[in-house]
Image (cartoon, grey):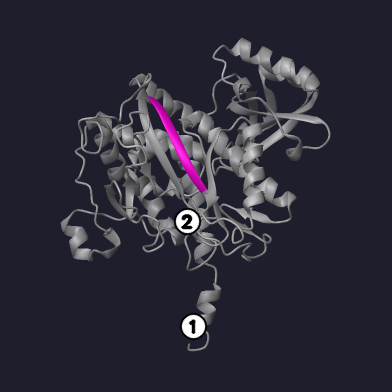
Amino acid sequence: MNLKNSDEAKEYVRKMVKERDVKFIRLWFTDILGFLKGFAITVEELDGALEEGMGFDGSSIEGFARIDESDMVAMPDPNTFVVLPEKLREKHGIARMFCDILRPGGKPFEGDPRYVLKRNLQRAADMGFTYYVGPELEYFYFKDSKGTEILDEGGYFDMVPLDAAIGLRKETVLTLEELGIGVEYSHHEVATSQHEIDMRYTDALTMADSVMTYRLVVKEVALKHGVYATFMPKPVFGINGSGMHTHQSLFRGERNAFFDSKDPYCLSGMARHYIAGLLKHAPEITSITNQWINSYKRLVPGYEAPVYLSWARRNRSDLIRVPEYRPGREKATRIEFRSPDPACNPYLAFSVMLAAGLEGVEKEYPSPDPVEENVYEMTEEERQSRGIRSLPASLLEAIQLTEKSKLVRKALGDHVFDAFIKNKKIEWDQYRTQVTEYELKRYLPVL
């Protein structure tokens, strides 16, 4: 549902609540790290919530507010209303809506990731663009959350009997569709027990809400069947990690601004500027698209994860790829940014990717030549001679680059920028003081 008129959307919500005998409505939002938060209200509170929002204490939400300014208001977005399928609820009818977080006076709260994305989408709209994305979220199924015992020995696009999780994927897809989330593909991924379900290409705000819902549904369906699903970027050493390759394009109305039928790659000059912006600013946005210590265990050569700043059409070792599934088709022309992982905050990740691309468009950054050779197999001297830089190799390096970035500060706003940097510095300090199993095995017998 996407009714532009707010009053129409509210009336639709009221009508559906009565028709579907809804008793409770869950109000959802996210903290700065992308964890889903929320609380439930009864149907009797619905009218008040739709008109005035629901107050709550924001001081316990990561990155939200200090104790002395903790009062917040969750304002439901009626366009996100959906009744939860039976498999995701108890016997009573339950619905959910995503919320925008406001200050008590009604002003948008600058620490709300959804508001951050809305601000960046408005910048694109002011330039005449709508930002569309299609993220491919990979994940693993394990026997439980205490270890990495796999469910199957399947590989890329494998079917039975190797793929033991076909039933889990099927139920997940059906549940997503009941929630109004379109699905294009579902399949086994390259690594054992690794899977992927791809949602249908849509505008970035709708997609960010859908990513939050997707991650919850994948985990809930897995738990229902006594197994565990994880979006941890690199849970198992020696095999591929999980990425969130993000297809994206800009549209002017119904026309794809990335398309040019006369170009060999079917890319417009503006698309090439957008690619150049992503390549130039990729290192400083990486702490947002890859925000965990573990994220950098995935971003290493040899496991299909991009490390080097290059672009091409067929080459999957590049950071940016131009898919060739439907060459020459205007609406299908898009670029694929391959470094993000599925444990990011989608509102912030889409924001910084868009900001980097728009910077290239506004300033008309020249696009480097595509690199169709395998960048992993080049020597360091060859990469340097072609001007191919690298992504940061650790969370510390990534945070240090972000901290100096005017582009990221502008995209996130001071509140989220400062809170995010502070949180990640604490995470790094906690990590670097740990004594790991690797150190004990390597050093204890010899030192």
**Residue at point 56% right, 42% down?**
34
Mark 2 → mark 1, Cα distance in angstroms: 25 Å
Range covered by the magenta-colored residues: 130-137
Q: Earlier in the sequence, mark 2 or mark 1?
A: 2
Along the line of sight, the residue nearer the viewer: 89 or 70? 89
Query: Chief secondary structure of the magenta span?
Result: strand
Residue 336 location, x and y as percent? 37, 42
The residue tagged with tag 2: helix, strand or loop?
helix
Residue 38 shown left or right of residue 331 in the figure: right
Q: Which residue is mark 2?
A: 295
Disc 2 residue type (three-letter):
Ser
Residue 95 location, x and y as percent? 72, 28
Disc 1 residue type (three-letter):
Tyr
Residue 36 location, x and y as percent? 62, 40
**Residue at point 54% right, 24% down?**
108
Q: Which residue is mark 1?
A: 443
**Residue at point 45% right, 59% down?**
298
In the image, is residue 136 part of the stretch drawn in magenta? yes
Along the line of sight, the residue nearer the viewer: 5 or 186? 186
In the image, is residue 298 part of the stretch drawn in magenta? no
Residue 116 location, x and y as percent? 48, 31
The residue tagged with tag 1: helix, strand or loop?
helix
Residue 110 shown left or right of residue 320 in the figure: right
Residue 177 position (above or below residue 189):
above
Taking the view exactly as shown, the residue that stands out farthest to the front is: 160
Residue 397 sits in which quadrant?
bottom left
**Residue at point 29% right, 39% down?**
275
Residue 254 sits in which quadrant?
top left
Front position among marks 2 and 1: 2
Q: Quadrant of the N terminus?
A: top right
